Amino acid sequence: MSGRGLESTRFHKLGLVSPEDQSLRGCERIARKRARQAEPPASPVKTGAGQIRILMGAAVALTCLVLQSPAQEQPPYSLGRSNLPSLIRPYVPPVVPPIRLGNSNRLHDLIRGGNLYLTVEDALALAIENNLNLEIARYGPLLSDSALERAKAGGPIRGVPSASSQVSSVNAGLGVNGSQASAGVGGGGGGGGGGGGGAATIQQVGAITPTLDPSVQNFTTFGHLTQPQANTTQSQTDALIESVHTYSTNVVQRLLSGGGIQYTNYDQYLKENSPTDVLNPAVGPHMDLYFQHSLLQGFGTKLNDRGIRIAKVNTVASRESFRAQLLNMVSQVVNLYWDLASAREDLKARQNALEITQKFVDDTKYEISVGAIAGVELPRAEAELGSRRQDVAVAQANVRQQAIQLKDALSHTEDPALESAEVIPVDRIEIPDTDDLPPLREGVATAMAKRPDVAVSKFRDQTAEMDLPGTTNPLLPSLTVTGRTYNRGVAGDANAGHEPNPYFVGGYGTALGQIFRRNFPNQSVVATFSASLGNRQAQADYGISQLQFRQSQLTGQRDTNQIVVDIASRISAVRQARARYDTAKNTRILQEQLLEAEKKRSSGTTTFNAIMADQRQLIAALLSEVGSLTAYAHARVSLDQGLGETLEKYNITLEEGLAGKVNRESRPQDIVEPHKN
């Protein structure tokens, strides 16, 4: 059963009515009400209105069928649409995905015995699912999708107000006031208006895309008017009493080519107490069709759809921008992982040095007790022991600090289990026999093809070029052609004492027949031309856009040149890190051999001092080797990041990053303490 069916079943079990059922039942009630109102009354005018109500009832019934169409399934990583009927859905807010603040279950699955055992893959999986900065970045593609939806609707950019004008249509010739308006002697009123305010507005540079969503506007007026008649020549009454019903519906559709179509359906019902009216009551409908199009300024699909094309490019660019943030996050987490692993190795080396120094102090005490060496050597040995203890305390603090930074990158919010757990890296830094570094030109080509920031820069240049017609077209003068065709009809009951033309006697249907037969056709064509004699604003806007576009092209070339330098520096850093590691490793081996040799011939104060010096040098060599391992790992991560291959190396897809869910399961393994080379 679908989700909608389950929801409806749940409502019925509770004895309630689901929102969808309420909507459909409301439609049924409206249809029954329209059918009851459709009974034809005695008046011909009302009979025509009843026929229209029948049509409206049928339209409502058809609407009810449309409302039952299910909502379309939404693609992932986008705003969801409501499950309400399709006719109502555009007027309710879309479903915005809620924020995610809880940590994934993977985090607690990896905690065993109060320890969080992590491989690099597990750390990256936790970061993808729980990193707060990455979760914030996931809204970028959602925002670009919404911006594309808005661009498809046309109109000015977000934040720029738009203005529209409504034209009122007056149906002259009906009744006393209509006759006076036709003759040009009426006092007017209610038909027009104008004026403007002095409020400041934000302006959009360049041509504005027309609003592309069709719009429907209806004005319905019911009026009862009483007007004193000082001159009763025409009205033949001291007080003119009118009952007026006015219905006006406009449907407007703007075109990407730079024009628009408007259909107007107008109907006026008039009943008054004047004996001079030939038809009373009377109806005067008319139907108008407008077509307006720009021929110079504002003309062309390439001009008016540039916002849509730019928004489409931005949706792809936003995914690349997210990929860049995902890549940077992966590099950051890997570096934090190796920093913690290095800090633990550093702590282990210093603890080993502390144990050796403690044993040396014990041996010194024994040597003093048997008279082999002077007692003055004990304070020196204990001072060395205190120094080693201080080193261990500093190393322990460093491990805690590195663990806190890694935990912050792997969690959404505070988690007591995570806070109390000790993070234990399982993987070790492995240095391959050969680095297999790419040649410089090959590395640059790889970076240009795979780096997301390079793709974003190209998209930025592409959208800037797309937007250039927005300041080029306004250089032209404005030439607009407007065509209008409309048909009128008049019908009503014969007023007492008058014998009107039988052609006009009837109701609303009679008047509609006149319109559809085009008995009274009207057409007009208007051409409007305007031009700015100086045109300095358009010239300046065009110049600014062109200069900014050329500036961005030079900036792109500068960034390309910087990539060459960047790749060369990162390749050199890997080579230097390997050389440093090889040197540190050899030094550590030699210091171990030297210390063992010194211990074998230990005797007297001179040998005591030499052993202490050799021990310090061995500790320094061990720490240097650990530091060189970390430096190599960082250099390798930096090179992969510069080449844009980080995600490929760690088998991470963009879809996993967008979804915030890694499909691979983390399987806790038996932990084996890493051994030394």
Image (tube, rainbow, N blue to C red):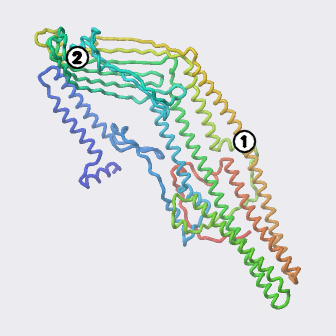
**Rendered view: 350 above or below 608:** above
**Rendered view: 446 above or below 475:** below
Mark 2 touches mark 1? (CB < 8 Å): no
Mark 2 closeness class: few <14, some 14–19, many ≥20 residues within 10 Å: many
Question: In the picture, which quadrant includes the C terminus?
Answer: bottom right
Classify residue 658 as left or right of residue 490: right
Earlier in the chain: of badge 2 and badge 1, it is: 2
> Looking at the image, which is closer to me, 274 or 83?
274
Give the Cα separation between the discs numbered 2 and 1. 76 Å
Mark 1 closeness class: few <14, some 14–19, many ≥20 residues within 10 Å: few
Look at the numbered disc 2 and give the secondary structure of its residue.
helix
> Looking at the image, which is closer to me, 589 or 405?
405
Residue at 57%, 59% (x, y): give it. 408
Look at the numbered disc 1 and give the secondary structure of its residue.
helix
Q: Amino acid at mark 2?
A: Ala
Q: Amino acid at mark 1?
A: Gln
Q: Position of residue 128 (x, y in %)?
A: 55, 55
Residue 174 picture quarter: top left
Residue at 74%, 52% (x, y): give it. 436
**Rendered view: 156 above or below 175:** below
Classify residue 92 as left or right of residue 631: left
Q: Position of residue 639 (x, y in %)?
A: 70, 51
Classify residue 335 as left or right of residue 410: right
Q: In the rendered structure, find residue 562 and report the number of the disc placed on it.
A: 1
Residue 181 picture quarter: top left
Q: In the rendered structure, find residue 511 and report the number of the disc placed on it.
A: 2
